[in-house]
Image: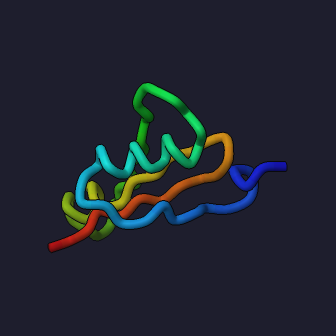
Amino acid sequence: MTNAAKEWTEAGSFDTVTAAARRIREIEGRAEGGIFLSIYVEIDFGSDDEAFGHLEYTGKRALYVIKRRMN
């Protein structure tokens, strides 16, 4: 059973979505191409900035959470 079947792994905080996607691609061992990210939107509270600042990716090795660095 892989970690992807068990729990979420925080991939870290990044200044750009591109940098986060590149890091996940490296962790997953993918040589090229992009990745599809999911956005969780809290219906009852939260802002667009919060929604776009928390992205998720389901990989073969793990489930990743990416958080945008807030300046």
Query: On the rendered structure, is 59 left or right of 43?
Result: right
Nearest the camera: 42 or 59?
Answer: 59
Nearest the camera: 23 or 45?
Answer: 23
- Of the 4 image quadrants, the one containing the C terminus is bottom left
Q: Residue furthest top?
A: 33
Nearest the camera: 46 or 44?
Answer: 46
In the image, is residue 26 above or below residue 36?
Answer: below
Q: Position of residue 62 (x, y in %)?
A: 64, 52
Rendered residue at 29%/44% (across/down): 18
Q: Residue furthest left?
A: 71
Quarter assignment of residue 35: top left
Q: Position of residue 13 (x, y in %)?
A: 36, 66
Q: Position of residue 10 (x, y in %)?
A: 51, 65
Count of marks overlaid on the render: 0
Q: Position of residue 6 (x, y in %)?
A: 74, 58
Which color scheme is applied? rainbow
Query: On the rendered structure, is 9 left or right of 44?
Result: right
Quarter assignment of residue 40: bottom left
Rendered residue at 51%/30% (across/down): 31
Rendered residue at 40%/43% (across/down): 22
Q: Residue furthest right?
A: 1
Query: On the rendered structure, is 38 left or right of 49?
Result: right
In the image, is residue 33 above or below residue 22?
Answer: above
Rendered residue at 59%/39% (across/down): 29
